[in-house]
Image: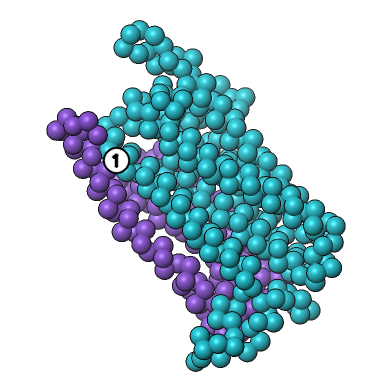
Chain colours: A cyan, B purple
Amino acid sequence: MSSSVSSVSSEEAIVRDKKNMWGGGQSPYGVSWGKLYMWIFLLSDAFTFSGLLIAYGTMRHSHADVWPAANSVFHHFPFIEKEMPLAYVGLMTFILIMSSVTMVLAVEAGHRNSKKEAGIWMILTIIGGFMFLGSQAWEWYHFITGTEHGRVLADGTVFHGANMVMNEYGTTPLFGDFFFFITGFHGFHVFSGVCINIMIFFNVINGVYEKRGHYEQVEKAGLYWHFVDLVWVFVFTFFYLV
Amino acid sequence: MSSNNHEASADHSHDTVGPAARKRLWRVFWLLLGITLFEVGIAFSSIPHDWLIKLFIALTIVKAYYIVFYFMHMKHETTSLAWTLLLPLALLIYFVFMMMNEGNALNWARTIFDMAV
């Protein structure tokens, strides 16, 4: 039943001699080169995001006295007048975790060579991705346009919202800069993930992987998509919770 | 880490495929959702802020573990692949502590010594 499961890697890992793992003639990692490349790319991407988040942490520490509290900035919720801190990003997290589970179920369906199920789970994952992107657009819109009261500047004028050099939430532009850069970089990852998922979806329903005999491509896209979810878990903690 | 995986990919299929595997994935989903709701809940509790931050970081690492090991199937990869990918991340621990110190020093320079940094 499982003969076609990740056929590339199982071919390579027919005999795994533990004593002579790196002696040649066998695959020490037991994965195909494509999957290994994806893993190593994700490791390097993890370092990129770590660099961004650590830079954010450093600057936040250095401006601890003037850094705005996330609770007081991100408290809007669609159609609700009342302030609801964290509720909206909580919802965004839910959407992304949900689309992560649909993705892993597409991978599972691919292991069983079930074209129909893999297609259904893929389309649900794509919908989840678009929902997240839409949520982020809404969040950015409110961050940029700001509140009605805004912030009164030294010369008496009122400044609303945020741009790269100024924001109404605090006296340092760094808060807005890091918000734009980190959530923007993550959002761009989500966007490319959705594009990849759409391509994979069409390949699934056109029977490309059925003909090939395995659905490993779905797995690779899945690795990327879960990584995007993983990054959001960290952004959620360090930008919104802490 | 990934247990005795010498059979590697040839034999892990029943761990990642089938009704039991699907049930396990949904369990991981509910766990991740539960932890997130818990985090949002305690954000407004009376727990001291220092402890809250430590708790949030610990819970984030728990969530990351479940995403990487269950959703990304690292649990079913060979031990050598898992170590190859996870060990470089240890460098980040040093980087984090170094840069947080740096941030505090910059804050001192700015607020106490009135330097333009």
Secondary structure beneath dot 1 equals helix
Viewer-side residue, A7 vs A1: A7
- At 53% from the left and 64% from the top, the residue drawn is A40
Q: Quadrant of the C terminus of chain A?
A: top left
A40 up-or-down from A93: above or below: below
Q: Quadrant of residue B91?
A: bottom left
User: What is the quadrant of residue B87 in the picture?
Assistant: bottom left
Q: Determine which quarter of the picture holds residue A90.
A: top right
Dividing the image into 4 quarters, which one contains the N terminus of chain A? bottom right
Residue A18: percent from the left, percent from the top? 52, 89
Q: Position of residue B13 (x, y in %)?
A: 68, 76
Q: Chain of mark 1?
A: A
Outermost front residue: A24
Give the crowd class for mark 1: few <14, some 14-19, many >=20 residues within 10 Å: many
Q: Type of residue at label 1?
A: His
Q: Residue at x 25, y 46 (%)?
A: B102
Q: Which residue is label 1 attached to? A: A61
Q: Residue at x 69, y 52 (%)?
A: A196
Query: Can see residue B48?
Result: no
